[in-house]
Amino acid sequence: MSDMRAKMEDITNKLKSNNIRLSHQRLKVLEYLDHNRIHPTVEQIYEGLHDEIPTLSKTTIYNTLNALTESGLVKVLTIEDNETRYDIRTDAHGHFKCTACGEIYDFEVNMDSLEIQGLNGFRVYSRDMYFSGICPKCMEQE
Amino acid sequence: MSDMRAKMEDITNKLKSNNIRLSHQRLKVLEYLDHNRIHPTVEQIYEGLHDEIPTLSKTTIYNTLNALTESGLVKVLTIEDNETRYDIRTDAHGHFKCTACGEIYDFEVNMDSLEIQGLNGFRVYSRDMYFSGICPKCMEQE
DNA sequence: ATACAAACTTGTAATGATTACAACTTAATT
DNA sequence: AATTAAGTTGTAATCATTACAAGTTTGTAT
Ligand SMILES: [Mn+2]
Ligand SMILES: [Mn+2]
Ligand SMILES: [Zn+2]
Ligand SMILES: [Zn+2]
């Protein structure tokens, strides 16, 4: 996908600068997020890593994701109200959730193109866009 | 704010067409949402109505909000991961959450102005925009 | 007005995601 | 190899939301 050595170096530096250790579990969670670009829930990460690391606890996954979120290495998605999802893509992009199959798709967005009113004097740090509807795959099956 | 008689008629019709009865509790929840445009949580609605209706239960508030959401009379906000908020404004607009004071502001947005890529063939039903940062009030107090 | 059935309300219990905590283990540094 | 701060883990606690069953109300037909 992208250059793994550069990415690992980036990760190492970001973690070190935040006094976060490069533990076995954390690297595995990061690897899972990198290889499974599905905006997974904690449950999915847990199930996905369980065979390889049977002793991994959900608490560790929560701790890891909270630490990675604080240092900016992952982004939290609150597109659903009942469970938090995580994204290793941290650049600006939008998310589309198909209400039929539940899959969450990335889409590219030019944030500067958006015409807005009513935020004069506001300091905007983050911009999230959540769309929903039906994906092409699900539209075929009708 | 707007013409109350027209609004009530609209509400009555929408509820009747969905076989939802106009109970005392539901009207009070709707009135609270109309008078308190703060995108309240269930807890806030509960506290706000408790003096007037001491017997009101949280279950009823949840049931009411779910029914109103399904008939399109209120919108759900998942700007926060830990608690759902509700909005009586159902037209397209964006939301800004101040990370300092927690207040959620509305802003106007021209959805058609947004340049996006990667949603060809998708049927988009809803578009939500959640921004966050610091509001002008909180920026003064620094 | 009265009767009726479907819908609604309420308190309590259950569920499910997330966090708190304390004992044990590991990673990084000397 | 020793040291220490940070991390991991299982369990218990918390908190928002839903499930459920018994009693109540609403809208409608008589
Ligand atoms: Mn994404
Ligand atoms: Mn709003
Ligand atoms: Zn789909
Ligand atoms: Zn503020």
Image (spheres, coloured by chain):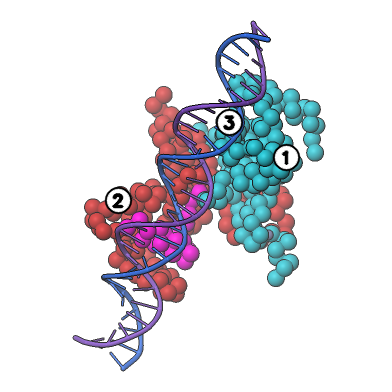
Chain colours: A cyan, B red, C purple, D blue
- x, y percent for residue D28: 35, 84
Q: Chain of mark 2?
A: B
Residue type, numbered disc 1: Glu
Q: Chain of mark 3?
A: A
Magenta span of residues: B57-78
The answer to whether residue A142 of the structure is visible from this angle is yes
In terms of sequence position, does the residue under pointer 1 or pointer 3 come before the other? 1
The answer to whether residue A32 of the structure is visible from this angle is no
Q: Is residue B115 above or below residue B98?
A: below
- x, y percent for residue A2: 79, 35
Residues at discs 1 and 3 both on one chain: yes
Q: Residue at x 70, y 35 (%)?
A: A28
Quick one: quadrant of the C terminus of chain B?
top left
Q: Residue at x 67, y 40 (%)?
A: A54
Judged left or right of residue A101, residue B26 is left
**2 or 1: mark nearer the eye:** 1
Query: How crowded is the residue under tag 1: few (<14 C-alpha within 10 Å), some, or many (20+)?
Result: few
Callout 2 secondary element: helix
Mark sitting on residue A52 = 1
Q: Residue at x 58, y 31 (%)?
A: A67
Q: Is residue B100 magenta?
A: no
